[in-house]
Image (cartoon, rainbow, N blue to C red):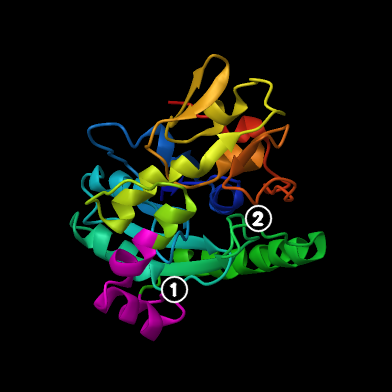
Amino acid sequence: MKTEIYYFSGTGNSLTVARDFADKSDGKSISMATVVNRESVSTGADVIGIVFPVYHGGVPNIVGRFISRMDDINNKYIFGVCTYGDEPGIAMKYLSRTIESRGGKLASGFAVKMPYNYIDFSRSLREVSVEEQQEMFNGWRKKLESIHKSVDARETGRFETSLETLSKMVDTLRLREIVGKRVWLKRAGFVEHTDLTFWECIQLMDSGFQYDEECNGCDICSKVCPVSNIKMIDNRPSWQHRCEQCFACLQWCPKEAIQFGSRTSGGKRYHHPDVKISDMLRRD
């Protein structure tokens, strides 16, 4: 049996999960960013894993675009793994619907807690202690065994979720569109009117990024951006409104020169300690 694990990652959490599982199953881990712009994505794998971080209680836009390009998945064993900092919500059920729209079926969906790497409601970077991080990493190593056992046995029907009632209420009342869109665009400093949906608006949230006087034009932010959203102009980064909000640019900047809003300066940066910048570089 051939196994391929497709992942999306900004700071290395999901990359680590994908890589670890691929190693354990003698499979191959593949960055979605390297194939998402193809007209179609075909695979000879019998087992397909989809690994991604939970964003705003849901699935990153790039994951949806990737799945929309997948061909002939109706007879594949597909499982998902989401990494999360607070709660996984019903991200796996969203993923299941997207896969079904392409004629496939999500067999199982798992959730793995990893260090939080986004801004919190105070608009600051949340710091996770080294001890807390290590506890999460140890938890993943243990969970890897159970996920591998489940996939190896081709089990179905297991979906790890949380706060289902609240998540469904958010969808029913369209709170992302009515409240979330306005709040997050404001936090990103985007003040123009837009008729885009909440999920479409995420690409505009890069309005919140800027560089400070520490920027030396090293170009790392541009190179680690998984969706080629950063263009270097006069040796300085310029965001092009195709953002995924993965925060790779901010978290990997060696000078900590990239900020989001006014409260991230001096905040502790994070990327998975087992992941190097060379692992994150786009290879498309």
The one nearer the camera, 283 or 238, is 238
Residue 124 figure quarter: bottom right
Circle 1 SS class: loop
Q: Residue 16 has which mark?
A: none
The one nearer the camera, 228 or 144, is 228
| Left or right: residue 176 compared with residue 123 | left
Q: Mark yes or no: residue 64 visible.
A: yes
Residue 40 pos. (x, y %): 23, 36
Residue 280 figure quarter: top right
Q: Residue furthest bottom?
A: 165
Residue 170 pos. (x, y %): 33, 76
Note whether 129 is above or below 88 in the view shown: above
Circle 2 SS class: loop
Are there few (<14), some (14-19), or many (20+) residues within 10 Å of tag 2? many
Residue 137 located within the stretch drawn in magenta:
no
Note whether 48 is above or below 134 in the view shown: above
Are there few (<14), some (14-19), or many (20+) residues within 10 Å of tag 1? many
Q: Bounds of the magenta span?
A: 157-182
Badge 2 or badge 1: first in the primary sequence: 1
- Magenta span: helix, strand or loop, mainly? helix
Residue 174 located within the stretch drawn in magenta:
yes
Note whether 66 is above or below 124 in the view shown: above
Q: Quadrant of the C terminus?
A: top left
Q: Residue at x 68, y 68 (%)?
A: 139
The one nearer the camera, 215 or 158, is 215
Q: Please, what is the three-letter code of the amino acid marked with disc 1?
A: Gly
Which residue bears the numbered disc 2? Answer: 125
Q: Mark yes or no: residue 153 visible.
A: no
Q: Please, what is the three-letter code of the amino acid marked with disc 2?
A: Leu
Which residue bears the numbered disc 1? Answer: 89
| Left or right: residue 53 compared with residue 242 | right
